[in-house]
Image (spheres, grey):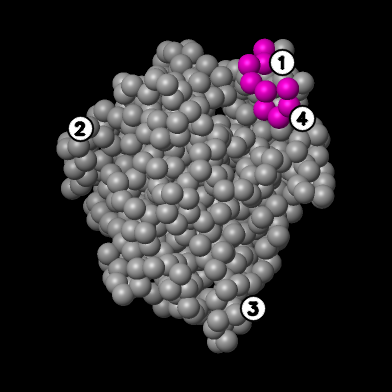
């Protein structure tokens, strides 16, 4: 039995105060100049909404870190060999990619994320007060705003525990440096339990739609809450399964929350269905069109899963005619690629408020200073050979996301992802599937957090993780639907394989989502890799896979997660399986990666050295990454 400690007490948010160079009064730059005292600020609904929008805007500033934490170390990327400017960042990213992160690297500074959390906490603290003061502010409006802020806070903590494992946790506001108290890290699973309980308490209480489509997609809605719950339950089931803890009871005050691994996988499926159904109902209220043409949808018999249908011609050459889905979701013009019907929640960037998304040019695509190129060997392995083999050639997503010949038909010798760069795609008949891409880099691209196919694949992974003939069929049905939507030899029927190890798996047909040597979880992982490429998901997916396969109580315990008499294995078995199952496609000497990661702690980021130093011994560095070129002796 696990008992949550009083994590609702005031806890240090070092990223907000202790290591900052400005006072906490300076954080809320939305304060009018004549209201420098916070007690005088909270007067009406407008003040509350100002901080509410500030939370979203602040989260936009952390997108680069979310992308690096959630994607960089994965098998999808290599360092851009056509190097241009910004050598310092290139060297930093290269060290991280080689499993040699250092706690001195500022990319691991989590302060910006805690600033977002603190904004959420401020809204939640003052909401009832504003409700009393402002008679134009209704109980219903507050209930919806509260659900938003609880969800947004939970989402930011969810990013933190996936990136760092154990983190400081608080639901209390910090207004001044003097209010910071130094507490240690809260266990990852305790935080996960808490944010699940929080989001469960407000599910269905947010808005389904807003008047503006930008707000419907850019603010937390009920569909977003359900997507978050699906994701969180998938993670909790995986973390518990890998520790051999198939059931658990959480004591929170006087209440007991009992959950099981199987029950959490089923909850993942249940909330995925809720998110998909809510999105579907929202979309029924209006039409999405490309110009004057209403876009055609296809669902392959999956309830509510209406996906944009691509247009294909000359199937024999594997040549897509029109990449409708990719163009609508990511866009190839100024108006396209934002807030599509398949989107559930995406952070909004626009020139009107000077909110730039610098990730698109800094990490992905090809331009001066771009740092990542697609790992051809890893993406080729998804298709059982090469990106340009039949299986890769016929997948229209590779025509949009894995591009080789770019910028005036000049072959640069490597593959790049342009899905965030508003590319103009001109499809050639070249046998190598090379295409011409005019890089129209756009610094105001939205950043998608959740979209339809992401949630569908969460559901598929839960089915595959539970296993069994019927669950495996359901997992593969989802994977095949997503796969075939983007395949040039599109077929209306979805073939369900009885066993992925049968002869059909060894001789896959073009368009079948069955790859040689796949099991069902790997089948889902492969589909997530290509479908969600460059969306900050892949490393988190690999961490979840490693945690699920950690080996339970394997007798090599070196951490005691919950109680002194319940040792938990160190997770080496899962690290080994993840590296040898996926990272070997990227690294020739993949055993070096395995040895550097060591155990489950190696899957997570080092804590920024200034946080450890400022905590005065209350925060311990990740034991795998406990070295730094800066002296923090006395604090680790």
User: What distance separates the C-alpha of mark 4 from that of mark 3?
Assistant: 40 Å
Q: Which residue is mark 1?
A: 554
* Majority SS type along the magenta span: loop
Q: Which residue is mark 3?
A: 140
From this view, report whether residue 167 is shown above or below residue 78.
Answer: below
Looking at the rendered structure, the secondary structure element under dot 4 is: loop
- Which residues are drawn in magenta? 556-564
Q: Which residue is mark 4?
A: 245
Q: Residue furthest front?
A: 178
User: What distance separates the C-alpha of mark 2 from that of mark 3?
Assistant: 52 Å
555, 440: nearer the viewer = 555
Q: Quadrant of residue 106?
A: top left
Q: Earlier in the sequence, mark 2 or mark 3?
A: 2
378, 322: nearer the viewer = 378
Foreground disc of the pair 1, 3: 3
Q: Earlier in the sequence, mark 2 or mark 4?
A: 2
Q: Earlier in the sequence, mark 4 or mark 3?
A: 3
- Kindly indicate whether the residue at mark 1 contacts the one at mark 2 (C-beta within 8 angstroms): no
Residue at image coords 60%, 27%: 546
Looking at the rendered structure, the secondary structure element under dot 1 is: loop
Q: Residues within 10 Å of mark 2 (few under 14, many from 20)?
A: few
């Amino acid at each position: 039995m696990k008992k949550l400690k009083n994590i609702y007490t005031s806890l240090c948010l070092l990223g907000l105060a202790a290591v900052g160079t400005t006072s906490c009064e300076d954080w809320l730059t939305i304060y009018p100049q004549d209201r420098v005292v916070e007690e005088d600020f909270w007067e009406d609904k407008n003040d509350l909404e100002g901080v509410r929008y500030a939370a979203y805007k602040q989260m936009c500033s952390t997108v680069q870190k979310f992308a690096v934490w959630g994607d960089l170390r994965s098998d999808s990327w290599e360092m851009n060999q056509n190097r241009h400017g910004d050598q310092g960042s290139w060297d930093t990213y290269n060290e991280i990619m080689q499993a040699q992160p250092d706690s001195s690297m500022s990319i691991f500074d989590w302060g910006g994320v805690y600033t977002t959390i603190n904004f959420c906490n401020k809204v939640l603290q003052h909401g009832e007060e504003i409700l009393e003061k402002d008679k134009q502010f209704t109980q219903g409006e507050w209930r919806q705003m509260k659900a938003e802020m609880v969800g947004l806070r939970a989402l930011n903590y969810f990013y933190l525990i996936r990136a760092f494992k154990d983190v400081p946790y608080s639901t209390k506001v910090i207004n001044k440096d003097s209010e910071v108290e130094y507490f240690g890290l809260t266990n990852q699973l305790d935080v996960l339990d808490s944010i699940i309980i929080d989001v469960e308490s407000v599910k269905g209480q947010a808005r389904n739609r807003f008047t503006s489509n930008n707000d419907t997609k850019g603010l937390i809605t009920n569909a977003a809450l359900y997507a978050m719950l699906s994701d969180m339950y998938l993670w909790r089931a995986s973390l518990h399964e890998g520790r051999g803890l198939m059931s658990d009871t959480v004591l929170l005050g006087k209440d007991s929350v009992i959950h099981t691994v199987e029950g959490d996988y089923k909850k993942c499926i249940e909330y995925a269905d809720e998110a998909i159904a809510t999105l579907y109902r929202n979309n029924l209220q209006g039409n999405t069109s490309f110009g004057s043409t209403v876009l055609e949808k296809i669902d392959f018999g999956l309830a509510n899963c209406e996906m944009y249908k691509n247009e294909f011609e000359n199937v024999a050459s594997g040549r897509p005619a029109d990449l409708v889905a990719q163009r609508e979701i990511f866009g190839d013009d100024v108006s396209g690629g934002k807030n599509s019907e398949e989107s559930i929640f995406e952070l909004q960037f626009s020139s009107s408020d000077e909110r730039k998304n610098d990730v698109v040019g800094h990490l992905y695509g090809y331009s001066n200073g771009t740092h990542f190129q697609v790992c051809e060997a890893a993406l080729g392995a998804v298709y059982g050979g090469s990106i340009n083999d039949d299986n890769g050639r016929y997948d229209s997503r590779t025509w949009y996301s894995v591009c080789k010949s770019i910028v005036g038909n000049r072959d640069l010798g490597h593959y790049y992802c342009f899905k965030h760069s508003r590319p103009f795609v001109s499809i050639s008949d070249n046998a190598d599937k090379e295409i011409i891409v005019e890089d129209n880099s756009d610094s105001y691209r939205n950043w998608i957090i959740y979209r339809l196919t992401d949630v569908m694949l969460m559901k598929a992974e839960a089915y595959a993780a539970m296993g069994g003939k019927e669950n495996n069929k359901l997992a593969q049905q989802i994977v095949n639907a997503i796969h075939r939507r983007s395949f040039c030899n599109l077929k209306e029927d979805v073939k369900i394989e009885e066993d992925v190890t049968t002869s059909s798996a060894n001789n896959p047909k073009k368009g079948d989502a069955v790859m040689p040597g796949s099991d069902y979880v790997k089948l889902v992982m492969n589909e997530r890799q290509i479908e969600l490429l460059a969306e900050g998901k892949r490393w988190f997916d690999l961490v979840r896979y490693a945690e699920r396969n950690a080996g339970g109580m394997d007798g090599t315990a070196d951490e005691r997660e919950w109680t002194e008499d319940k040792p938990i294995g160190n997770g080496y078995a899962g690290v080994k399986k993840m590296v040898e199952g996926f990272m070997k496609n990227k690294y020739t000497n993949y055993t070096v990666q395995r040895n550097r990661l060591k155990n489950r702690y190696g899957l997570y980021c080092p804590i920024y050295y200034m946080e450890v130093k400022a905590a005065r011994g209350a925060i311990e560095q990740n034991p795998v990454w406990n070295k730094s070129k800066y002296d923090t002796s006395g604090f680790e």
